[in-house]
Amino acid sequence: MTALRRFARPDVLDEIPLASHAWIEASAGTGKTFTLEHLIVDLIVRAGARLEEIVVLTFTEKATLEMRERVRATLVALVHAGPDDPRVDPPAGDNAWTLDAPALERLREAVEGFEAASIHTIHGYCQRVLQEHAFRSRGLFEQDLADSRSHFRRAVRAVLREALRPEDPAYAVLSAALGQDSPSSLTTTLTRWASEPGVLMPPASLEAVHAVAVTCSAPARRQALLAAAQHETTRTRAPLEEHVEALFACAQHVLAAPDLMTAAAAVNEWSSRPQGASKTAGEWVFERASKNPALAHALAPFEALMEAIPHFPMLVVQTLLPRVLAKANESKRAASEMDFDDLLTRVRDALEGEGGGELADALRAQHRFGIIDEFQDTDATQWAIFRRLFFEGNEAPARRPLAQRRALYLIGDPKQAIYGFRGADVHTYLSARDALAPHTERVVLKQNFRSTAAMIDAYNAIFARGFFAGPIRYDTPVGCGDPTLSAQYSDGGAAAPLVLLRPTVAEGAPQLTADGVRDALADAIADEIEALLGDGPRALRVGRAGALRGLLPSDIYVLGRQGRDLEGVHDRLAARGIPCAYFKRHGLYGTREAEDLLMVLRAVADPSERSHRLKAWLTPFFGLELSELRGDEELHDDHPLVARLVRLRDRCEARDYAAFGRELLHESGLSRRELFVEESARRLTNYQHLVDVVLERAHGRRRTVDELVVDFQQLIEQQSGPQVSDDIERVATDGPAVQLLTMHKSKGLEAEVVFVLGGLGSSDRGGTDPRVRHAEGVRQAWMRPLSRQVAEDVAREQAEEDERLFYVALTRARSRLYLPYFGEDRHGQSAYTLRAKPAYAPVQHALEQLVTEPSSAASIELRAAPAASPAPEGAPGAPNGPPAAGAVLPARREALAEEPAALPAAPTPLPSALFAELRRRHSGPFATSYSRLSGSARRRWSESSPNEELKADIHDASGLVGSSASAAGSPSSGVKRALRDLPGGASTGLFLHEALERVDLRYIAGLGDASEALVAEPGGTELRVLLESCAARNGVDAAHVPAAAELVFHALRSPLPTRAGEGLPLVDATRVVREMSFQFPIPEASHPSLTRSLAAGMGAQPNAEPLGAAPFRVERGVVRGVVDVVFEHAGAVYFLDWKSDRVDGGEAALRAHVRTHYELQIKLYTLGVLRLLDVWDEDAYAQRFGGHLYAFLRPLGLGEEGVVFERPSFADVQRWERELLSMSFGGAAALAGRQA
């Protein structure tokens, strides 16, 4: 007879009921995964289950992979472990499984068929259910993963178009909303709220509001308010009486309100009434109620009224969001796609729907046992699925035979429920716990196998001192599961597990600010890490007794409440040469490196744009200082800086993306500068990562450089596809490094030494993000401003989550924990006072108790973190700031200076005068423009541009007025006010010019009036998007887009004077060319004039004066230009220049302004257009040239006179040509002299 095999069984399994519901509560380091993997074995061996009858659900892919590997290893050990394995045949008295033949057979089947094991993420499980049970779930067999962001944004646009129809029920709300926010801002708000699973509060019900308003409008309520005011002091009584009278009137307005928007406006008007210099009536009255019980009682129904009325931003969300979500779901269904949330909701809906019973039976037959890991991070949808499959109708499985049992095992640590901002809901965990409580007992894992005994005792002491205030408590402190773990100094001395870093200031110095505290702690942390990793007496050795080892950089974590808490530490560690790296830091597209690359891409797309060039040249890709770019207006096309941009553009246009990336990173010198001068592997890694992203997206769709700019900008603005969520920075080093990470990312990790930073302020967020509270078991989502009770509930729940977050942070440490401490010194002074209700408060309060207890002396070391002294006046650097690059690297630079030169010494520089002469002699052809000739330093283009624009209209004067009245009629007073508020300056001028260049003329021609420009469909949304993008590109606030639309409409629809005297709107011209480029030689004596023909083959006229056979040569250079508009009407060609100048004084002032500022431009433009039209004599001039127009946009938008039209005589044009012949063109004269 074969002896039965025995295998060691963990004692903790004795506490878990076999094949019955169990609620298992873990703590940090208590071996949760170890317990789960052996629970699976216990079900196979003792409950007779097969592996495929057990479904194990985790919450991350990483946890799923780890669970599969560990379960497989345990099963393999049970089947194949030899006699040398200490777990095989333990002593008779030890806990062990007895493996009989059927049990071994089930284990062998589990090993052989392990690939089919049901160990999934919850989303993976739901996807499998929908695919395998497509008929029962009423779904498709195959569905793709949806790009939810794209579907949602398209749905928003569709709903906005629908709701802008006057007959739409949402028209009034949306119209009012667009008066305050742009469509992009509204989309952002809707996106934030779309992922909120709670009930939007308060409900949008006019009936409910009126019911409360009836109560508030009773005369007795007014008397109660006034009577309560009598309890006030003389100083506060009068203003309170005034405010409560207004509040009673407000309630009556609400009662009469025909819709919620009117009701919300009435309440907002009362709440925003001023009280004193800095408060509003809403704030002040309810503040008084906290000190006046009678007033609090009288205000109770009015507070209920305010809670019942959604604030206007919330009303917008409640009105539009359901329609947007429905539209997005329709879009996903039409595309046969689902997102991650859909996977859960469709399984839940299928189980609760018509065929839900049949689907539930099929899934129960497939899986008898469900094990849910990290259950504290679940939500109501997930719990509804688990409850339906394993709990409903199966509340007491122990009453059934073992072979027929179904059971649900929930395991988690509610103290680590920290993902409420992602929709995880610890209150769901509490509800599930309450549901299971009558049918099972709580199983608590009590042994911590991660940390030293001293470390466990230290944080147990913190948690025992009022740390947890909510329903989740640390009521079962853990003990040490591995007493062999220890930590000591390198000299053998005992190392305290808890070190407190106390910021200090010099005597008499003012208290530190929050930034000062961060800097002081960052300095102290860098000092500590340097000592821990060194070979001095404070170096730490960790491990098991008898096998201690020194620390590696990767044994140290620095945890921050927010990412910015870690930046100072990173800078200081890098300055000391200590390897450090951010752990899975999100926000790659929000870094300065991403902004730098976007600047370069913009300049590559349009090297002629001076603003783009300058911004690109100031990025590390070029390695220039601002002072080195003085005289940029002198740079020619062949200058190396310009040539590099042109070369990069050529490589993009040739689709040579590999060479494009190589030049950006390597040939530019960026890699060398970042590694050897700046010594910033972090920045270089980001640059390499970002360039890889650009190249990958360029190769995938063969994008042009302009498309790359748009695509990369969308990535930065988080508008482009699912890959946006994968914006995690790459690790900057391959070796061991100190890890810098946020507390949220530290969950599930551990380190020998942990530093904790942050939480100095409140966790409350500003803006319109959801604020969550739970009432009667329901998750509610509110928007600020909040009523007193709601605000208290929201603050309480946020404080409870902060407690849990710091519990996670503190329990990552294995051997030592460093914490900030803000207690008083021996003089009763503190260098920093925590703000009211900071997230760090529970830790600080516990530490204040600990440091005064004599029993804690051996486990705590208190160290000063002195703030840096202010730099002497005139000294470089700022106090308390991170080390400047120049201060950090002197030793490195000295070492480099001592090394032998790798390259020959640079030649002796030439004298500046000789260099200037050589440069003049060997310079290329001279090119200039009107901008250059007029001497303006504020032009759209520089002479170095290959597509030079002759612009001089970007002024920043004050005033306003003048042009021919708009055909669309005068604008309203509100529109006039918006137009007058449109700021002056170059940015606005560039914005308007770009808009007029790109707007669809056919769309403008089809509009009835200017008010339809942004709302008519199709086309209105596209125009708004165009104007918003133009505004953003030129630094103009999007709030000015409606005014710009008015200007564009009137500019293009106003009648323009012609030589025949008739008025012609530009949209009605026969042909229109915008932004027409030209260049022609600077006039010279040898060149043909308007009455002299060119040589044969160059446009000679049959009756013109002969020029001779001398070849046409350009001696003085060329004039370049770009005309805003060239249009044709009745056979004549006109040129038009848009002007955004502000000019006072009517038409006469406009004409004088044109003569004063644009006389030279008129001459150059006219001659350029005539050369373009091949006009060489007076007859051709009379037939082909119509004249020039200067259109001033602001007067046109106001319905005033604003167009200056002139048609010079042919004699005038000839005179201009002679003037230009004798005119000096700066560098052209020197060039001509050189060639002579």
Image (tube, rainbow, N blue to C red):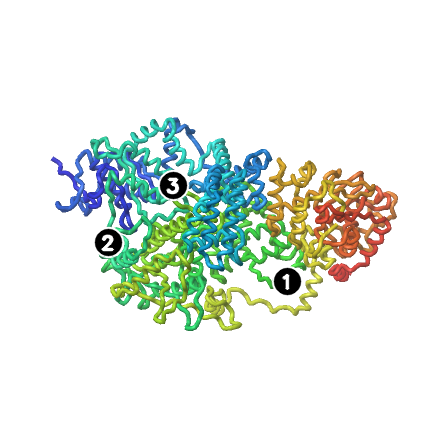
Residue 1037 falls left or right of residue 947: left
Front residue of 518 and 539: 518
The image shows residue 907 at horizontal and vertical percentages of: 59, 67
The image shows residue 742 at horizontal and vertical percentages of: 40, 53
Report, in whole angstroms, how far the alpha carbon at label 3 lies from the one at label 1: 64 Å
Front residue of 67 and 649: 67
Residue 778 bears which disc, if any? Answer: 3
The image shows residue 72 at horizontal and vertical percentages of: 28, 41
Q: Marks 1 and 2: which is nearer the front?
A: 2
Q: Is residue 351 visible?
A: yes
Q: Is residue 746 visible?
A: no
Tag 1, which secondary structure?
loop
Residue 477 bears which disc, if any? Answer: none
Report, in whole angstroms, how far the alpha carbon at label 2 lies from the one at label 3: 36 Å
**Residue type highlighted by circle 2:** Gly
Q: Are marks 1 and 2 in contact (CB under 8 Å)?
A: no
State the residue position of label 1: 630
**Residue type highlighted by circle 1:** Arg
Q: Are marks 3 and 1 in contact (CB under 8 Å)?
A: no
The image shows residue 461 at horizontal and vertical percentages of: 28, 58
- Residue 1002 sits above or below residue 1235 on the image: above
Tag 2, which secondary structure?
strand
Residue at point 64%, 54% (across, down): 610
- For marks 2 and 3 on the same chain, the one whose residue lies earlier in the sequence: 2
Residue 342 falls left or right of residue 273: left
State the residue position of label 2: 479
